[in-house]
Image (cartoon, coloured by chain):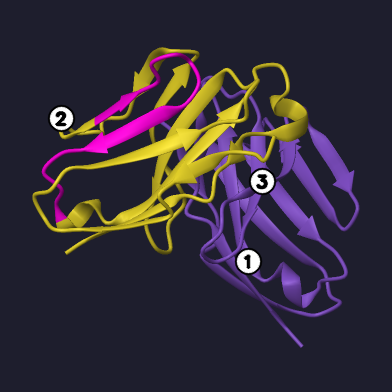
Amino acid sequence: GQNIDQPTEMTATEGAIVQINCTYQTSGFNGLFWYQQHAGEAPTFLSYNVLDGLEEKGRFSSFLSRSKGYSYLLLKELQMKDSASYLCADRTNKLIFGTGTLLAVQP
Amino acid sequence: DTGVSQDPRHKITKRGQNVTFRCDPISEHNRLYWYRQTLGQGPEFLTYFQNEAQLEKSRLLSDRFSAERPKGSFSTLEIQRTEQGDSAMYLCASSLVGQIMNYGYTFGSGTRLTVV
C-alpha cells in the first residue's frame, strides 16, 4: 500500500527555519516530490528527490532517506508569503499526495 | 505556452445534473492526470492518460465518472448524475516523461464544483 504521513499544521516565525517531515510506505518507489499550494491555487512544484541526501534550491532544501522512507522540506529565512500548504507526494506511475502541512508564518 | 488550462474555473450545478470539465495540458506533454481535492486534504488521484490511452483509473472513480483524451491533447472529465459529495476542486496536471525530475507535474488552476 501507499501511506504518506505529514503533520497537519505547523506555525513558525518570520525569519526562522522550519522543517516539515514526511514519511511514506510504498512499493515501486520512484521519487519523492514536494509541492507548495496557496489557498485556492494550484500546487506548484518545489523539489524532487530520487537519491538519498539533501537537495538545496535557494531558501528551500529537501532531504530523502530511502531506507527510512523519510523526507523533509527545510525552509530558511521564512517570509510571510511562505504561509501555504506543503504537500509531500511519492511517485510510482502517478503522484500520490499526503494530506499536506498547513504552515502559518507569523510576524 | 501558458501552462495547463482548465475550464470552467467554477461550476455550480444541481444534484442529478451532468457536468463536463475540460483540461488543456502543456502542448508537448504526453501525460495528463486528473485529481480531486477537498478542503484540508491533498489531491486524490483519479485517472491518467499517456497520449490518448487511459492507463489507470482509481477505485475512487465510480461509474458516474468518465474521462477522455481523444486525440492525445485536451481531456474532458464528465460526472453524470452529480451528488453533493462530488463537490470538490478538480485539478488537471500534465507532464513529459523524462522531464519529471526537473519540472515535476504542472497543475492547472482547477475547476471548483459545487453541487447544490
For residue B66, above or below residue A58:
above
Callout 3 amino acid: Trp
Residue A45 numbered tag: none
Whether the residues at callouts 2 and 1 have beta carbons within 8 Å, the answer is no
Q: Mark 1 points at which residue?
A: A84
Nearer mark to the viewer, of 2 and 3 = 2
Q: Mark 1 lies on which chain?
A: A
How crowded is the residue under tag 2: few (<14 C-alpha within 10 Å), some, or many (20+)? Answer: few
Query: x and y percent of residue A57 in the render?
Result: 88, 47
The numbered mark, 3 or 1, whose residue comes first in the sequence reads 3
Task: Specify whether residue B45 is painted magenta.
Answer: no
Callout 2 amino acid: Asp
Q: How far apart are marks 3 and 1 (CA)?
A: 12 Å
| Chain B, hue in figure | yellow
Residue in the image at 53% along x and 19% along y: A28
Secondary element type, mark 1:
strand
Is there any visible trace of residue B90 in the rendered image? yes
Q: Mark 2 lies on which chain?
A: B
Q: The purple chain is which one?
A: A
Secondary element type, mark 3:
strand
**Magenta stretch in the rendered image:** B66-83
